[in-house]
Image: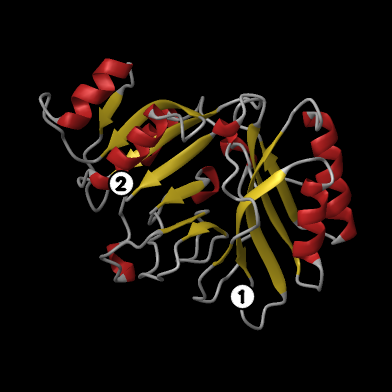
Amino acid sequence: MSLLRRVNAGLPQAIGFTRRPFKSLKFAGESLDASASPALLHGIHVFHCPDVLGIVAKLSESIASRGGNILGADIFVPENNQVFYSRSEFVFDPAKWPRVQMEEDFLKLSKMFNAMRSVVRVPALDPKYKISVLASKQDHCLVDLLHGWQDGRLPVDISCIISNHERGSDTHVIRFLERHGIPYYCLHTTKGNKREAEILDLVQDTDFIVLARYMQAFDAGVKLIGATSHFVTEELDSGPIIEQMNTVFPPLPRLGGFHTERICTALY
C-alpha cells in the first residue's frame, strides 16, 4: 500500500475532508535529532486507516521497539468520518533497524489496522523521485520549494519548471535555475487553450507533477491559497491531504480542464 503513485499510474481514490486542523503531538525526547549522532537517520511515516482506539500507541511502540525515537507527529481525524491520518517523523539507527525490517514492521501495522495506505520514507536511503513543477506568476511558493530542495529538505530531483508567465533572464528564479541546470519553460495559456498536451509531453519522464500555486480554476471563486498540500482530484479541495498547518485557509483550486489523473500533488 502506498500513498505515493507514479504520474502514469493514476491517482488514489479521492477523499473528502472537513476543515479541522491537524493536532501536533510532542513526544518525550524529541530534542534528539539526527545531528546528535552520525549513525542516526531520519524517517517519515504516513498512515491512513479506520479510526479505532490504540493506533498512536501501536505506532509509537513499533518505532520505539526498534530503538527509534519519534520527533513529532501530526494527527488528523475528520469529524463524523471515522478515519485516521497521521504523519510521524522519527530518527533511528539503521544498524539496529535495517530498512527491509522497517518495511516489514510497518506492513504488520497496516494489516493490524486494515490500513488503506501506509508509506515509510527514509530520504537518505530511498531513491529520489523526479518532479516537474507548474508555477504561477507569483514566486513565493516556487522559491520556497527551490530553497527546500537546495538545502536538502526535499529529497527529489527537479526535472523542469513550467509556467504560463515569463520571467526575465535577470530575475532571482531564472538565475537560480540556470546555476543548477534546471530547464524553465513558459507556455502562455488562453481561455481556449491551456497547452495541456505540451505540458504532458514535458513531464513524461517525471514521477510527480507539483503545483506551486498554479491557478487555472477561476470559476471556482478561489483567489487566495492557504498552507495546505494535498493530492489533486477532479473535485475542488477533495484530494487526500498530505500536510496542513493549524490555521485553515481557503481551499485549493483544481487545475481546470487538465487531465488530473496525471497530476499527483499540489503545494500550497
* 162 up-or-down from 243: above or below: above
Residue 242 visible here: yes
Residue 195 visible here: no
Residue 136 on image: x %, y %: 26, 46
Q: Amino acid at mark 1?
A: Pro
Q: Which residue is mark 2?
A: 141
Disc 1 packing (10 Å; few <14; some 14–19; many ≥20) = some
Tag on residue 78? 1
In the displayed structure image, the side of residue 207 where residue 200 appears, left or right = left
Label 1 to label 2, Cα distance in Å?
A: 27 Å
Give the mark, 1 or 2, whose residue is nearer the N terminus.
1
Which colour assignment does the render follow?
secondary structure
Disc 2 packing (10 Å; few <14; some 14–19; many ≥20) = some
Quadrant location, the C terminus: bottom left
In the displayed structure image, the side of residue 63 where residue 225 appears, left or right = left
* Residue at the image point whose x is 89% and y is 49% from the top: 108
Q: Amino acid at mark 2?
A: Cys
Residue 57 on image: x %, y %: 79, 63
Closer to the camera in the image, 226 or 35: 35
Which quadrant would residue 66 be assigned to in this image? top right
Instruction: Assign a secondary structure to mark 2.
Output: helix
Tag on residue 194? none
Closer to the camera in the image, 98 or 170: 98
Closer to the camera in the image, 170 or 53: 53
Residue 49 on image: x %, y %: 75, 63
* 228 up-or-down from 39: above or below: below
Which quadrant would residue 126 be assigned to in this image? top right
Instruction: Assign a secondary structure to mark 1.
Output: loop
* Residue at the image point whose x is 82% and y is 59% from the top: 58
